[in-house]
Image (cartoon, rainbow, N blue to C red):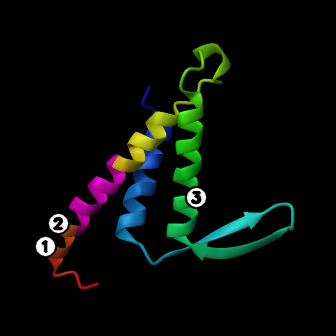
Amino acid sequence: MVGASGAISAVLGAYLIMFPASQIRVLILIFFRSFYIPAIFFLGFWIIQQMFAGIGSLGVNEQNSGGVAWWAHIGGFLFGIAAGFIAKKSYRNKYKYVE
């Protein structure tokens, strides 16, 4: 099962590699406030959450899992990281990219 969520996860992985120093605006509804955090912290927390959910879904029958393909999220994220490294190297070579 790979669908839109796996593709979005790949975009998140590539974003992490292409823009590692970026800031993400996070809205906390409980406090009615928003603030910026580094993308690496947000995406690190997100992938760890996906890993725990994926491991927790092992051994559970499909009817009780809710239909979420946790492993598609993890696989998409890892693919995005790999694609991000390739794209960054290609961009650097083609346009003399300086970090």
Picture layout, residue 93 above or below residue 68: below
Quick one: label 3 or label 2, which is nearer the N terminus? 3
The picture places residue 4, in percent across and down from the top left corner, at 48, 37
Give the image location of residue 99, x and y in percent.
29, 84
Answer few, some or many: residues within 10 Å of disc 1's Cα (few below 14, many 20 plus, some between 14 and 19).
few
Q: Which residue is mark 2?
A: 90
- Give the quadrant of the N terminus: top left
- Amino acid type for the residue under numbered disc 1: Lys
Q: Earlier in the sequence, mark 1 or mark 3?
A: 3
Name the mark on residue 70: none
Q: Main secondary structure of the magenta part?
A: helix
Identify whether 11 is placed above or below 35.
above
Q: Which mark is residue 94?
A: 1
Residue type pointed to by label 3: Phe
Q: Which residues are magenta?
A: 79-88
CB-based contact (under 8 Å), mark 1 and mark 2: yes
3D distance between C-alphas at marks 1 and 3: 33 Å
- Residue sticking out furthest to the left: 93
